[in-house]
Amino acid sequence: MRDRMSVLVVGAGFTGAVIARLLAGAGHDVVVIDERDHVAGNCHTARDSETGVMLHVYGPHIFHTDDEKVWQFINRHCDMMPYRHQVKARVGGKVYAMPINLHTINQFFGKAMSPREARAFIESLSEGGTEDPQSFEAQGLRFVGRDIYEAFFHGYTLKQWGVSPDRLPASILKRLPLRFTYDDNYFFHRYQGIPRDGYTAAVASILAHPKITLQLSTSFEQVTRTGFDHVVYTGPLDRYFNHALGRLSYRTLRFEREVAEAPYQGTAVMNYCDADVPCTRITEHMYFAPWEAAQFRRSVIYREYSAQAGPDDIPYYPVRLLDDKVLLERYVARAEQTPGVTFAGRLGSYAYLDMDVAIRRAFDVARHLKDAFAADTPPRAFVHRD
Ligand code: FAD
Ligand code: UDP
């Protein structure tokens, strides 16, 4: 057995940073590269030079989890500030609370129902019988009935995913709660927060270890693997294989920035659910840091648009339609026969992963690698399947 392995980690997002840190902590030498000029991947935050507002550069990120170990880990690397995500949704010129809760239901139907009455009422609107719904649309009709589904979910989902909701899996809608109380917390996890100094500082802290060398603005395609005992690759799975079997499809996002007098919309996220409004949502970034929001006289807003990702676009959301899943299986089969490389993270496993899940999986990958290195067995390729 060799005590010190030399490992190349491709990608300095949460996945790459956490794996690097755990391997470095076990005595291995780690080089982390990222083709961007910053760490933290899509969770990157930066102070806006014009206004001083902390920007969530690749879209809004709220840390939420039930995982005690993950929560303890992230709290060792940042000052996690209390934050409670509350989203507003515009439908036909009116503003409602999202996720759907008792306030939304009463407002939408112009009633004053109690929790029990609202539950019975929504159940009476439910369509689709007793079978477990497979598609997003079937799930929506079952979940809240046609009126609410069409107002809040159909148009938004068409814009966000670019395909009819009857082709999308029910699992996408299952991410959202439905509440018969006035609780409008977007998440149901025990812990929720946003790092005081942003996510980039948190990831920089994870990477700050004497056995980690960081090289930014460096792509995998530019470096030589000679001298490394193992590679952990957190970039897109199909890109590793030069898209030899075809491209896995992704949605990309475009953000249209505007600086306006503060406050602009008075909340962090306003969803635009109508299909005829082109943007999906507007984010007002100073509200992701409520502890400092009052100090700004000018506010930065992003109008967010979603589109099918082309070859030069940033891949944000894996689409995971049936064709993609078939292609994914073929790439996973190749990955499993690629010695010396472990594929991880949301791009490496082509899965939608929240930050806490990305960190939890990074713990698993690092443990697997440490065990394999210690036993002197070649680590088996490690690609999570969902
Ligand atoms: P990434 O952050 O994508 O990092 C991968 C890194 O690899 C990137 O920096 C990339 O530049 C680099 N890379 C790729 N290929 C190469 C290559 N060939 N050479 C060199 N470098 C390469 N999660 C939450 O928990 N809460 C939220 O509120 C939330 N909101 C989100 C909003 C949006 C719009 C999106 C898209 C995601 C959101 N997420 C959220 C998910 C979150 O972004 C992911 O969990 C997290 O980014 C996963 O980290 P990762 O390291 O696996 O991937
Ligand atoms: N969604 C919607 N209307 C909304 C909010 C969400 O139709 O106002 C749908 C949309 O398809 C989205 C899914 O519910 O992708 C899950 O919501 P979540 O907030 O998890 O969205 P994401 O993380 O995909 O942006």
Image: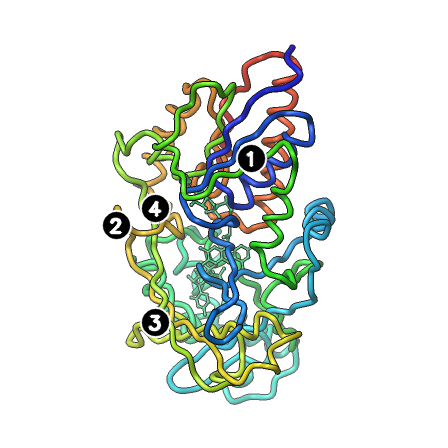
Name the kind of residue labelled 4 in the image: Leu
Residue 171, x across and y down, in percent:
47, 52
Q: Amino acid at mark 3?
A: Cys
Q: Which residue is mark 1?
A: 213
**Residue 279 numbered tag:** 3
Is residue 277 left or right of 175 when viewed as pictured? Answer: left
How far apart are the two marked residues, 4 and 2, measured between alpha carbons?
Answer: 17 Å
**Would you say the residues marked 4 and 3 are in contact, meaning their CB atoms lie under 8 Å apart?**
no
Q: Nearer the viewer, residue 267 or 296?
A: 296
User: Quick one: label 1 or label 3, which is nearer the N terminus?
Assistant: 1
Q: Label 2, on which residue?
A: 310
Label 3 near label 2: C-beta < 8 Å? Answer: no
Q: Image quarter for residue 146?
A: bottom left
Q: CA distance from mark 4 to mark 3?
A: 23 Å
Q: Sequence order check: which comes first, mark 4 or mark 2?
A: 2
Please tell me whether mark 1 or mark 3 is closer to you in this view: 1
The alpha-carbon separation of the residues under discs 1 and 3 comes to: 40 Å
- Distance, label 4 to label 1, CA atoms, is 38 Å
Determine the secondary structure under disc 3.
Answer: loop
User: Which one is nearer the viewer's eye here, 325 or 40?
Assistant: 40
Precedes in sequence: disc 2 or disc 3: 3
Residue at figure coordinates x 46%, y 74% from the top left: 50
Single out the mark in the foreground, 2 or 3: 2
Whichever of labels 4 and 3 marks the residue nearer the N terminus, that label is 3
- Nearer-N-terminus badge (4/1): 1
The residue beneath circle 4 is 321
Q: Residue 199's spot in the image, x, y percent?
A: 58, 56
Residue 246 vs residue 152: left or right? Answer: left
Residue 115 coordinates in the image, percent (x, y): 65, 77
Q: Secondary structure at mark 1?
A: strand
- What residue is at 42 percent from the left and 47 percent from the top? 36
